[in-house]
Image (spheres, rainbow, N blue to C red):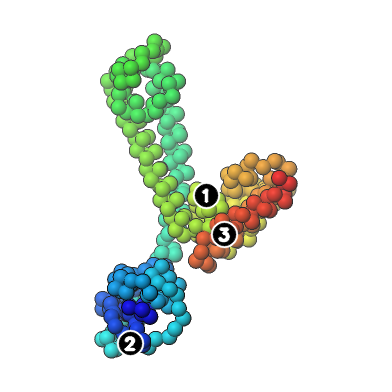
């Protein structure tokens, strides 16, 4: 079917040839379904109805939207489609769908940032908790088997699965003359339980890290490409939202996380901070002390640009921004 165009409006998708509709897929007549399809379209996704119609045509399909370009050749044309009333769709239905779409948009824009911020904060707390409890476990278990921590094994798993020294030696096939003292069954079970809790916390922390990484890829791909998901997530969390980060000047982004040092500078005249969270970025903390401030400023400038691209734009321009940053760093360091 040459010269056949695929066109979608708010109540359906249509195949049009020579000005006439030859096939169509109408959307369900409920506001929720229409709102969900409008959201998918706004996200640049192809609807199932559109895929079905495209399969009927195969090669030679024409499309009138950049979103549909994977299905066919892009053309610019105007086609008279049927009115909603001709297909028994009311404007009241559209109005209800628009209200649902608007609420969903608000919910997504608010909740994703808030959830991301809470996840980043939880990861920080879990890091501290896991480290403290692991040190407690090592200190306690060293009374029984201090040599375990010199073996390079995952001692948490060993303690959880085996408990006492004899069981660990049997499992590993290694026998060591230990200076540790014997351990009663009660202490053995307590230490096994503690190691199990630490492993659970560690695994949950890894789940949160995956969530942050996936969320950052979704809402802030340019920042993620430039800074990595962890640092980017911390900046968004500290700012309060992607929108707030996008509205910040680069000079503020540069010292996010260094507010105490900034206040000391303002109150007592101490040297101003040159960086906050962005010190975590390799290009900053690996730079020579004499140029670290300039490097931090250059990175903050690019983060500000990336935040605005992610909030106001639709494309991932992380690579382009990072290439520009590397050029700026060459000028700063002379390398």
Residue 306, numbered circle:
3
Q: Residue at x 39, y 38 (%)?
A: 202
Dots 1, 3 in contact, CB < 8 A: no
In the structure shown, which secondary structural element does the residue marked by tag 1 occupy? Answer: loop
Q: Position of residue 114 (x, y in %)?
A: 44, 58
- At a point 30% along the width and 27% down the height, the residue shown is 161
The residue lying toward the viewer, choosing from 177 and 42, is: 42
Q: In front here: 37 or 54?
A: 54
**Sequence order check: which comes first, mark 2 or mark 1?**
2
How far is the residue under mark 1 from the one under mark 3? 12 Å
Residue in the picture at 28% in, 77% down: 25
Q: Quadrant of the N terminus?
A: bottom left
Residue wearing tag 2: 20
Please tell me in which quadrant of the rendered image residue 93 appears: bottom left
Looking at this view, is 108 or 316 the one in front? Answer: 316
Residue 266 x/y as whole percent: 69, 52
Which of label 2 and label 1 is nearer to you? 2
Q: Whole-Å distance between the Cαs marked 3 and 2?
A: 45 Å
Q: From where the camera sits, is residue 172 visible? A: yes
Q: Residues within 10 Å of mark 2 (few under 14, many from 20)?
A: few
Mark 2 vs mark 1, CA separation in Å = 51 Å
Q: Position of residue 139 (x, y in %)?
A: 43, 24
Mark closest to the chain's N terminus, 3 or 2: 2
């Amino acid at each position: 079917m040459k010269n056949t165009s695929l066109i979608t409006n708010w109540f359906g998708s249509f195949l049009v040839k020579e000005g006439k509709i030859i096939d169509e897929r109408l959307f369900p007549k409920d506001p929720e379904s229409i709102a969900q399809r409008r959201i998918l379209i706004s996200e640049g996704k192809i609807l199932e109805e559109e895929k079905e119609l495209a399969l009927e045509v195969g090669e030679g399909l024409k499309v009138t939207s950049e979103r549909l370009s994977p299905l066919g050749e892009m053309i610019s044309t105007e086609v008279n489609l049927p009115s909603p009333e001709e297909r028994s769709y009311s404007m009241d239905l559209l109005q209800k769908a628009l209200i649902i779409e608007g609420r969903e948009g608000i919910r997504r824009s608010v909740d994703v940032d808030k959830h991301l911020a809470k996840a980043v904060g939880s990861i920080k707390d879990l890091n501290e908790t896991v480290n403290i409890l692991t040190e407690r476990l090592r200190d306690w278990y060293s009374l029984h088997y201090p040599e375990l921590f010199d073996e390079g094994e995952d001692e948490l798993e060993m303690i959880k699965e085996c408990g006492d020294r004899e069981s660990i030696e049997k499992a590993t096939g290694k026998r060591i003359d230990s200076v540790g003292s014997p351990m009663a069954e009660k202490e053995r079970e307590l230490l096994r339980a503690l190691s199990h809790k630490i492993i659970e916390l560690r695994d949950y922390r890894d789940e949160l890290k995956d969530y942050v990484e996936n969320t950052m890829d979704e809402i802030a791909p340019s920042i993620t490409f430039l800074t990595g998901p962890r640092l980017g997530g911390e900046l968004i969390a500290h700012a309060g939202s992607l929108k707030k980060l996008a509205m910040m000047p680069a000079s503020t982004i540069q010292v996010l996380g260094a507010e105490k040092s900034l206040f000391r500078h303002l109150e007592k005249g101490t040297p101003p901070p040159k960086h906050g969270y962005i010190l975590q970025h390799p290009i900053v903390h690996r730079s020579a002390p004499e140029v670290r401030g300039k490097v931090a400023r250059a990175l903050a400038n690019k983060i500000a640009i990336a935040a605005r691209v992610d909030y106001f734009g639709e494309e991932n321009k992380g690579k382009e921004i990072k290439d520009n940053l590397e050029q700026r760093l060459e000028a700063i360091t002379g390398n």
